[in-house]
Image (cartoon, helix red, strand yellow):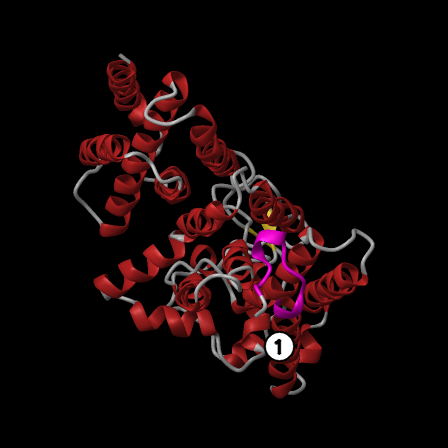
Amino acid sequence: MKSLAYFLTLAAFAAIILWLSPHFELDQPFIGYSVGGAFLLFLAGKPEKVELLATCLLGLGIGITVTHLGLLPRMLVTMAAGFGLASMASMLSAAIWAYPRSRRLTWRVLGPASTLIFFVGSAVHTLMAGFFRQRTYDLYAYAFDGSFGTELSFVLGRLIHGKVAPTEVVVIIYELVVVAIAAFYAAFMHRRERPLWELMELLFGASLLGYVFYMVFPATGPGYVFALFPMDALSIDQIRQLTPQSIPISMHFPRNAVPSLHLTWALLIWWNARSLPRWAQLLAGFFVLGTAFSAMAIGEHYLFDLIVALPFALLVQSLMIRTVRFTSRERWLPAAFGLSVFLVWLAIGRFGLPLLFLNRLLPWALAILSSAICLVWAFRLPALIPEMQLQRS
């Protein structure tokens, strides 16, 4: 009887999903992939065979229904969303009827999956709407990049410019960060019977703190400022003579460049993968590199945004540690260092650009030094939660 009720409820949820799907904006990467992340959590929750089969068939059906032939990145987003919606429908049905597994096991997955979808969806429709500041500091970030003797975002952008397949791959890598968050959470699910809310707090705490600093140093990215990006870069001599000032940018473009939350999330995933298998650690490391490359190549970020993301990520990681006392030096020393370096970089980007142009080696030396210290310190921090502590032989 419960099995019949489960399938009837699942069918009803599927009908509602298909009816409402035109209003879900499933082709929006953050929304589509955040919904799709529910499927990874569903799999990590070790569903029963009948539940897995029903969800996969429903996910394939929803994905085919809502996906339109077009660019590969958009098709992947909507297919992922189809499987995510099917997972949510299946878990809701299982929670109602306690079939084919107990409500406790179902809510262990359904709670975090719902939180991920709600938070990301809310962020897209509110905080990322681009209403912070009418004028941005993009020219300051652009001039900062020029002090390195090269405009790296334009250089990387030209590597893929006009090449369909490489561009699609780079776009997909950049947009996969929400899926990476879901995979990161799923990797630790088997280590605790209760939801790992600390992981959600780590990643979403970075978001909330990042949104605060978006108002301090508002910037959009070179792809929004330069109409012919990446082909319309100024020469280094022209940048030297440039007098940076705030510029008006369309309010349709979000001021979410400084710091880069994409790189921040990727760094936090990498730093907290220390107790996972070696292949997972390497994959997380490569994802950091891929995110950094794609963020600049598609014009979403300047090099400046990525440099300041490292001390910012160290700050967030230090504040969120749960394996040491709140007053511990192991927490506050790296947190104070991360905050100080982050603020110093913002001050340099806003007021110290003439100093950087005095010697081309100076910005390189400062960037390498601050980044190296952040990376070394991050890997020496105590584990975020007990479940992440390394097992010593």
Q: Is residue 216 left or right of residue 100?
A: right
Location of residue 37 in the rendering, given as x and y in whole percent from the top left corner:
39, 42
Q: Taking the image as drawn, is residue 343 in sight? A: yes
Q: Is residue 167 left or right of residue 230?
A: left
In which quadrant will I find the N terminus? top left
Q: Residue at x 56, y 47 (%)?
A: 199
Name the magenta segment's main secondary structure. loop
Location of residue 346 in the rendering, given as x and y in whole percent from the top left corner:
69, 63
Q: Residue at x 42, y 50 (%)?
A: 183
Q: Residue at x 55, y 72 (%)?
A: 145
Magenta region, residue range: 379-391
Is 35 contained in the magenta span?
no
Sort mark 1 into few (<14), some (14-19) or many (20+) by Cα contacts within 10 Å. Answer: few
Q: Taking the image as drawn, is residue 231 in sight? A: no
In which quadrant will I find the C terminus? bottom right
Location of residue 70 in the rendering, given as x and y in whole percent from the top left corner:
19, 46
